[in-house]
Image (cartoon, rainbow, N blue to C red):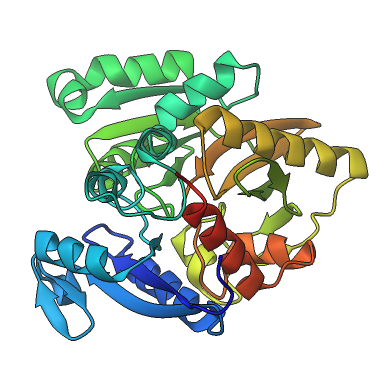
Amino acid sequence: MDQNIKKRVVVMMGGSSSEHDVSIASGEMVIKNIPQQKYEVRSLVLNYKGQDLWKFEDSLLTPFEALKKIKQWTDVVFIALHGIFGEDGTVQALLDFMDIKYTGSGVLASALAMDKAKSNELFLYHGMNVPKFINFSDSDWEENSKLVTDNIKKEIGLPFVVKPINNGSSHGVMIVDDQENFQKAIGNALKYGSEIMIQKYIKGVEVTCGVLYDGKDETALIPTEIVPPSESFFDYKAKYTPGGSEEITPARLSEDLLKEIQSISTKTHRLIGCKGFSRTDMIISDGNIYVLEINTIPGLTKTSLLPQGAEAAGISFSDLLNRIIKEAMSRN
């Protein structure tokens, strides 16, 4: 990279998913912390104020107009989108089609990580521990809810976690510990997607670990322990409210467990085929580490976990962003 010429970065944020506001917070934090001496930065807000238009600089444009404009201006797009369209491979496919470089994982890795059932099947196949799970569609539920319910009782049993397969930030996630909450949990999850995953609830220590990829090697960051103070799991409120959870970096675990968590995070990153960065969520119970899911675009807000793990590893937020951008720009 020519040190005398600033590279141009467009930070893409917003979107039409339930994670629009979180994405805006991430994007604004990225813009604020990108090294200004290295980069010229502009924002691209998708679905600006709920519209189907995208805002680039002061112009409201159709998506295609916006993509043409940023292709003319930018060297790389920093994707700060979360959820459907941004994290599932869709926007990555659009940027590939337009031959625009972007941060983070590509189409296949993004889509695979976003599908919690498929990614868990992959982890299980490669010898990792995952909580026992089954999945079904809204049509399965509508056509024969009794059969689905009986299968859940037989295969999973109480308590269990209900979650949409393709969503993030714990939207639509509920823990069910009695039959009275079951119907409510299914209805709530279906608000966020047509595919549902039922996962055995495992009580234990929640941890997460980020991974950085520089184009050649993966580096696991410092694992963080998550302690929600009042909720039974790390839900949306606990994730994005300052003080909503206690996050301890490094996690209060033995050196051997910390190293194993880092090893698992690196392995999930490779298995999914991630680029740039990722963050894997796990839970530890009776000395066993269970993989819950992998995030290809972790949050980058003030309360986000990836920057905490990076800081504990001696990597400032600005340096973290610089590394992510440099890796994206180095791709052919």
Horizontal arrangement in the rendering, residue 109 relative to residue 213 (left or right): left
Of 7 and 186, nearer the camera is 7
With respect to residue 129, does 241 lie above or below?
Answer: below
Give the quadrant of residue 281.
Answer: top right
Q: Where's residue 156, x and y in %?
A: 49, 21
Q: Residue at x 39, y 55 (%)?
A: 102
Q: Is residue 234 left or right of residue 289?
A: left
Question: Foreground: 6 or 254?
Answer: 6
The quadrant the C terminus occupies is top left
Instruction: Please tell me in which quadrant of the rendered image residue 245 appears.
Output: bottom right
- Taking 185 as reference, is 74 above or below it? below
Instruction: State which quarter of the image contains the N terminus.
Output: bottom right
x%, y% of residue 98? 22, 50
Residue 280: give x, y in percent of width and height. Answer: 60, 43
The residue at the point 56 percent across, 76 percent down is 302
- Furthest residue toward right: 255
Relative placement, left or right, of 220 versus 116 is: right
Name the residue: 59% across, 37% down. 269
Q: Is residue 136 left or right of residue 261?
A: left
